[in-house]
Amino acid sequence: MKRSTIKKLLNTKPEGQEIVVKGWVRSIRNSKAFSFIVINDGSTQTDLQIIADDTLAGYEEFSKCLNGSAFSIQGKLVESGGKQPIEVQAISIDIIGSTPQDYPLQKKGTSMEFLREIAHLRPRTNTFSAVFRVRHELTQATHKFFSDKGFYNLHTPILTAMDAEGAGELFRVTTLDPNNLPLDKSGKVIWEKDYFGKESYLCVTGQLEAEAFACSMGSVYTFGPTFRSEDSNTTRHLSEFWMIEPEVAFADLDEIADLAAEYIQYMVKHALEHCEEELNFFNKFIEKGLVDKLKKVASSTFKKITYTKAIEILTKTTKKFEFKVEWGIDLQTEHEKYLTDEHFKGPVIVTDYPKTIKAFYMKQNEDGQTVRAMDVLIPGVGELIGGSQREENYEKLVTRIESENLDPSLYQWYLDLRKFGTVPHSGFGLGFERAMMYITGMSNIRDVIPFHRTPKNIEF
Ligand code: 4AD
Ligand code: MG
């Protein structure tokens, strides 16, 4: 008989029909003439209780199995008098895989730090299976949101020769032997001898390639892994993270700021609708008030202010910051936190940053000082989205590339987009794990990605 998932059984009317269910033991409680076995198969947050009579074949063995063992159970699906609507009266139980004493996941509270060390087993906990069911739902929601709006999904390259953010946070890709590098007379590596014939890296963004397709297909979006070697050991930074990057031709900054707010709200509503059980669980055990917070965000308009205004707010408050506030600084976490958590008490979109702290491709404003950039800041997490209107003027872009000391020859194809039928266009990047943090209430970014990569950490 084919196995049913617990999720499916919960949607089945219990009429004593025979079913097969397979999963991992959460607990076994033995009483006089029978055992209560609780299993979970990951299909849903809800566990399933099995009642096993001591007359069943193999009772001696399976009733002594430890948590974490895998069972196959054939039984009758019946109504339950307990917490769950259904339970199973076992007809036969097979041990698929037993577990010895040293199973690391014991009933007692296990810390998030410890669970990171056993990242291969943590999806067996309630918290992590819930996190990754939500992650699945938000992935589906993302594709649906953009597809319904007529955006085309685009798979941009992961290997690249360009520092597309100009921030120097690249992971080098090479097939050269580090112990036997081809060197020229002055001791410099001859990159022409490397695999791609030039210095190559993992991508930090798919934006530049997405621009090429926006400037032909209109509206596109990417959803892929990106890599940054920034040395930030914080609760909000990963070396490998997933980013969603929509890019829209003929759109200005205001248009994509609206798109950003709509997309965030769409994800939040989707989670409220499709992940009720998980969100209630997080609301109880991870972040008190989570569900109310999400409901409020789903229905409120996002505040929008310029960077200059943000600096004004930060200068006027009596709150003391560690980093000095003055026009021209990059906003620090404490500043962003003040704006979202204390001043606006909700998400805020900050626009028109000084050009000196933003990437080369952003559209320069008339004032010569600022660019048409935006960051979407959200409570508890900080920067969720970075985006901009792109510089569509060929000369201005060349000048900027040169003044940033980037090699213009690498950007020739990108400049071509400004040479042949150039149009205003805009886009943004949303850090998927930061959205996950906000929607689940999980406070460390390492706990919302299946296997995290951070400095000095590449286990699993
Ligand atoms: O602001 P960023 O660097 O923007 C870009 O990459 C643009 N190319 C996007 C675009 O306009 N198409 O990154 C975008 C978002 C950030 O707002 C943040 O949410 C996330 O990506 N992010 C990270 N998430 C986790 N770990 C890191 N190290 C991150 N760096 C950026
Ligand atoms: Mg940014």
Image (spheres, helix red, strand yellow):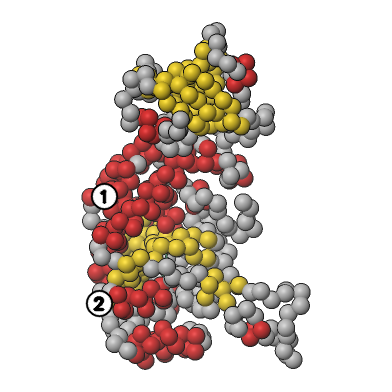
Give the structural element (helix, strand or loop) at label 1. helix
Examine the rendered structure and indicate whether residue 447 appears above or below residue 73.
below
Residue 298: which numbered mark, if any? 1
Amino acid type, residue under disc 1 in the picture:
Ala
Q: Does label 2 point to a residue whose CB lies under 8 Å from ligand 1? A: no
Image point 37% across, 48% down: which residue?
A: 137
Q: Please give left or right for residue 49 compared with residue 459 in the image.
A: left
Q: Nearer the viewer, residue 190 or 379?
A: 190
Image point 58% across, 64% down: which residue?
A: 231
Give the structural element (helix, strand or loop) at label 2. loop
The image position of residue 210, as x and y in percent, is: 38, 73
The image position of residue 433, as x and y in percent, is: 44, 55
Determine crowd level at label 2: few under 14, some 14-19, many 20+ residues with C-alpha closer than 10 A.
Answer: some
- How far apart marks 2 and 1 lie (CA) works out to 27 Å
Image point 58% across, 70% down: which residue?
A: 171
What is the residue that sits farthest to the front in this orientation?
1
Examine the rendered structure and indicate whether residue 379 appears above or below residue 367.
above
Camera-side mark, 2 or 1: 2
Q: Name the residue under label 2.
A: 250
Sequence-first disc among 2 and 1: 2
